[in-house]
Image (cartoon, rainbow, N blue to C red):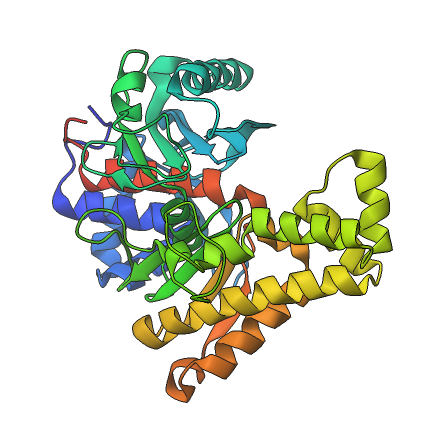
Amino acid sequence: MAPWSALSADELQLLVSAFWSAGGSRHHLADRLGYSKSKTNALIAGLVGQGLLAETGVQPSNGGRRPESLRLNDQLGVVVAVDIGVTSLHVAVFKPDLSLLGEHAEPIDVREQGPGAVLPRVRALMQDLLQRCGASKRQVLCIGIGVPGPVNFQIGQLVNPPLMPGWEGFSLRDDLREDYAAPVFVDNDVNLMAFGELWRLQRSLQNFVVIKVGTGIGCGIVCHGEVYRGATGSAGDVGHICVDQAGPRCYCGNLGCVEAMAAGPAIVRGAVEAAQSGRSPVLAEMLRTQGQLEAVDVAAACRSGDAAASDIVQQSGRLIGQMLASVVNFFNPSHVFLGGGITRMGPLLLAAVRQSVYQRSLALSTRHLEVQYTPLGEQAGVIGAAVLAMHETLRAPGAAR
């Protein structure tokens, strides 16, 4: 049972607003909720008295008394966040206000390793981080997990994940229930990135998309201030939008999917071909000394002025932008945030994406559109996992999970 399960509707709404405000003042919370000053002060006093809210210092003055910052009380417990990528694993422990307590990241490969290999490692890292942070399993408020595949959010189960062939029908929630009494929430990794952006922006943007480009390509959709999952949880699977009907065959069986032509593996294939054909002496030397190439090598070659590497980066950006133009024309977001491993490719790729989006989208759709890399960088996944867990726990504090 969550520590806020017995709150009134007004108290819970204020607590939720305090979480999303990330250290807002009394005046800010009252303004955000439309409550009177006296009502807000009374509710805050009650929540502080119950140990749910804490005043954590003063903010700069705008003239008059300096306002106090209000955050969820550290003593409530901790939040565990897990970001399982195709080639990486990132686990973190946060305070309830999402201040980071500890984290660990390491490489994995879920295409070759099933849940029998990955989940014991996840549990071990969770336990190790909790110990390092001085917390116990009983102090875990909630757990958020992201995975690179479609998820039935209601039951926390993966549904035919193309990049995780050994995970079909597996329930991460049920697996962790054996060790933790805390509620567990599982979602697609790019939806978590959307949650992370929502929290960073304190829900100030209502309609935007987050594009993750790594081994695959996915899209997190925020519509009217809420993450949109679609009828069956597969909304945002933009990686299989066709950008060239004569293109290579994707693992999904179709030809010319943007994921097959512009994601990390496609960039690496282009780099290897450029190295072996002699078009790129820089990449050829990297391949000779390292024995293999990665997308970051293409970025490095690009920064050194290698023309072939620049062509590869720009081609990837153009194709991603071509796909995004369809999304922009259909959804009309105010912002597009790019994340995932692609952010390491630097400004040239971002410029190519922007040029393609603006060239192919309707003028009305792009009049105020901003396209940029996510400021959260590689932290986006675990931050989003923590936001998801807190959001869901606060929204339905008494619900059994």
Left or right side of 88 for 280: right
Instruction: Give how far across and how far down residue 275 sits, in percent.
Output: 78, 50
Q: Identify the residue at image location x=48%, y=13%.
A: 124
Above-or-below relation of 133 to 373: above
Image quarter in which the N terminus is found: top left
Determine whether, in the image, residue 50 is placed left or right of residue 248.
left
Who is closer to the viewer here, 340 or 40?
A: 340
Q: Tell me the quarter of the image containing the C terminus.
A: top left
Q: Residue furthest bottom?
A: 363
Which image quarter: residue 119?
A: top left
Picture coordinates of residue 266 (x, y %)?
58, 51
Which of the two residues, 200 or 304, is positioned nearer the viewer here?
304
- In x, y percent, where is residue 246? 47, 65
Task: Name the residue rendered at 45%, 60% in the picture.
Answer: 256
Q: Is residue 347 above or below residue 182?
A: below
Q: Tell me if residue 356 comes above or below residue 76 in the rendering.
A: below
Q: Classify residue 292 as left or right of residue 112.
A: right
Q: Quadrant of residue 329?
A: bottom left
Task: Give how far across and how far down residue 355 sits, in percent.
Answer: 57, 77
Q: Is residue 201 something one can see in this rendering?
A: no
Choose between 32 and 136: the one closer to the eye. Answer: 136
Residue drawn at (61%, 54%) of the image? 343
Q: Can residue 395 be seen? A: yes
In the rendered view, would you say 221 is above or below 380? below
